[in-house]
Amino acid sequence: MNLLPKASGSRPRLACEIAPEGVTAARAFTAEGPLESVARIPLAPGAVTPGLKPGNLPDRVAVIAAIRRALESIDVRPNSRGAELTIILPDAAVRVLLLDFDALPTKLTESLPMVRFRLKKLVPFEVEDAMVSFQVMSSSKSNVRVLAVAIPRDILQEYETAVREAGFEPGTVLPSTLAALAGVAAPEPSLVVNAGSTGVTTAITRDGVLLLHRSVDLQPAASGADPTIPPQLQQLSADELANEIAQAVSVAVAYFEDTLSTPPSTILSAGALSADALRHVLSGNGYSEAEAVRVRELIDASAFSAGAVTGSIPRGSLAGVAGALRG
């Protein structure tokens, strides 16, 4: 998996994000250019239930059909030449961690085992049976900070198999928020919130370096669950969901202030929750008008060509594919 890559044009020029709310596809001719065409196919609740255990795609048939329809809508034929694409997975299906080492070998054959060993106590699955990738975020004489990503192989296989059965070939695989972060152009510190019906991730970047990545699962606690309903199909109430999102943002804002000695001037919104909806959630959960932080979409109109029809697609849902195509 490529993490926060520089714009090199080395990845496929097609991207597809599989999320609980729907499948989004996009195409761009160059890494620096705008999205030339985009499409989004909604999914019924429960079709995608991301997590770290098998069963992420309860309605595989619907997901496969949505992948095919989304890509066909941007004029990509299944089982054709050039059908390789970047897949973007829900954050809940992946673990993203920042790790600190006193030192790290430069050879991958020596450094990867060290990263895997550190992850053993930090992730709730067998690291030896997982796909692990990492990238050095910063280094000094006494510290090396690493961004590590791990996903159980059987979970990764679920998504890749669905893409192949839809008639396309998986190339690069990225978690949703890391994909979206590639679209953050400003060198100054940025706080990004990627929220949806099943989870919220907050991330802070500064000049391309990741300072914080925190994901919160928004499934209800087991103690309050209805035992007759499968856990992956249970939903929080609207008020509970809003409160959890506001709490996650509050924690990220506090971390931003503690780390950078200044509050964020703007929150960048990605994912299924629009900037307007996120602003409403914050204003209704402890943020007064005076304290409210400016919220805007992570990507703006400049990310799209004149021919890309986006009016019916939530802007935040395009953040992942737009960022993925920057690489």
Image: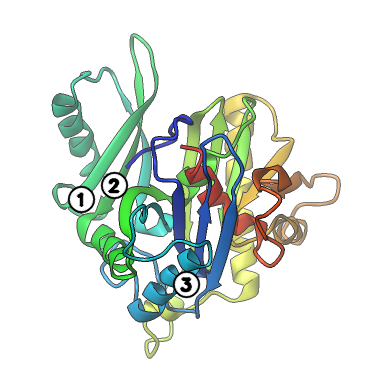
Residue at which label 1 appears: 130
Total tally of numbered discs in the picture: 3
Q: Secondary structure at mark 2?
A: strand
Instruction: Give the spatial CA distance, label 3 vs label 1.
Output: 30 Å
Q: Amino acid at mark 3?
A: Arg
The answer to whether marks 2 and 1 mark residues whose Cβ atoms lie closer than 8 Å is yes
Given residues 17 and 219, the one toward you in this image is: 17
Residue at which label 2 appears: 150
Residue at which label 3 appears: 69
**Who comes first in sequence, dot 3 or dot 2?**
3
Q: Secondary structure at mark 1?
A: strand
- Give residue 207's position: percent from left, percent from top: 56, 25
- Give residue 231's position: percent from left, percent from top: 38, 78
Quarter of the image holding residue 118? top left
Instruction: Give the spatial CA distance, label 3 vs label 2.
Output: 29 Å
- Give residue 53's position: percent from left, percent from top: 27, 66
Crowdedness of circle 3 by 10 Å Cα count: few (<14), some, many (20+)?
many
Q: Is residue 107 above or below residue 88?
A: above
**Who comes first in sequence, dot 3 or dot 1?**
3
Crowdedness of circle 1 by 10 Å Cα count: few (<14), some, many (20+)?
some
Crowdedness of circle 2 by 10 Å Cα count: few (<14), some, many (20+)?
many
Q: Amino acid at mark 1?
A: Ala
Instruction: Give the spatial CA distance, label 2 vs label 1.
Output: 6 Å
Which residue is depicted at the point 66% across and 48% down? 304
Q: Is residue 24 left or right of residue 109?
A: right
**Who comes first in sequence, dot 2 or dot 1?**
1
Q: Is residue 206 above or below residue 2?
A: above
